[in-house]
Image (tube, rainbow, N blue to C red):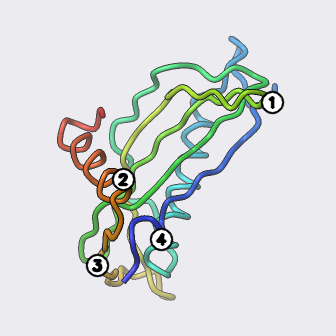
């Protein structure tokens, strides 16, 4: 059975002028796209199948990401249903020179595993075998139960 830690993915995007809005910060649509892509990859890693986005819960934009900084997108599976996979998503602005990070955006998404006919298919049970995995799962469940604002 897949472990939560196996689903933890990070991806970095260098914020370029073509990603920016008129204020010189990352356009929210780009952030959402990056979140959905990394979230789907995490869900697919868990399910071992293609997964499609079923829902993205409330998205909280807390801070902007300026051009020239890095958007670090983090995703991991924290809960499953019969064919659904719940993924916690967080985005950080990261200074590429120092590695200093600040939380900018977060949400929770649901993906559904599908077969070759694009029909929902069962997913395995999630296991959590490490202290770090337990911490991540508890944080996600706590944030999700508070109306998706951790």
Marks 4 & 2, CB-CB < 8 Å contact = no
Which badge, 2 or 3, comes first in the chain's sequence?
2
Marks 2 & 1, CB-CB < 8 Å contact = no
Please identify, in this view, whether the residue under mark 1 or under mark 3 is nearer the observer: 3
The quadrant holding residue 78 is: bottom left
- Circle 1 sits on which residue? 16
Q: The N terminus appears in which quarter of the rendering?
A: bottom left
- Circle 2 sits on which residue? 55
- Measuring from the top left, give residue 146's x and y in whole percent: 19, 36
Label 1, label 3: how many angstroms apart (C-alpha)?
39 Å
- Measuring from the top left, give residue 136's x and y in whole percent: 35, 51
- Measuring from the top left, give residue 120's x and y in whole percent: 36, 79
Numbered disc total: 4
**In this view, which residue lies farthest toward the top?**
23
Q: The C terminus appears in which quarter of the rendering?
A: top left
Please identify, in this view, whether the residue under mark 2 or under mark 3 is nearer the observer: 3
Which badge, 4 or 1, comes first in the chain's sequence?
1
Task: Kindly identify the residue that appears in the image at 53 percent across and 37 percent down.
Answer: 91
Label 4: few (<14), some (14–19) or many (≥20) C-alpha neighbours in 10 Å: many
Which badge, 1 or 3, comes first in the chain's sequence?
1
Which structural element holds mark 1? loop
Please identify, in this view, whether the residue under mark 4 or under mark 1 is nearer the observer: 1
Judge from the rendering whether residue 25 lies leftward or rightward of residue 103; answer left or right: right
Label 4, label 2: how many angstroms apart (C-alpha)?
12 Å
- Circle 3 sits on which residue? 125
- Circle 4 sits on which residue? 51
Task: Kindly identify the residue that appears in the image at 39 percent across and 66 percent down.
Answer: 4
Which structural element holds mark 4? strand
């Amino acid at each position: 059975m897949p472990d939560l830690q196996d689903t933890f993915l990070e991806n970095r995007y260098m914020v370029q002028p073509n990603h920016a809005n008129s204020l010189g910060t990352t356009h929210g649509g780009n952030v959402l796209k990056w979140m959905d892509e990394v979230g789907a990859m995490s869900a697919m890693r868990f399910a071992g199948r293609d997964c499609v986005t079923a829902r993205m819960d409330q998205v909280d934009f807390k801070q902007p990401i300026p051009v020239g900084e890095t958007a670090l997108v983090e995703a991991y599976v924290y809960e499953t249903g019969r064919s659904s996979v719940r993924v916690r998503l967080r985005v950080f602005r990261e200074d590429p020179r120092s590695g200093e990070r600040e939380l900018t955006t977060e949400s929770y998404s649901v993906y559904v595993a599908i077969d070759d006919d694009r029909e929902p298919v069962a997913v395995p049970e999630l296991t959590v075998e490490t202290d770090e995995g337990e911490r991540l799962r508890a944080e996600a469940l706590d944030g999700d139960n508070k109306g998706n604002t951790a």
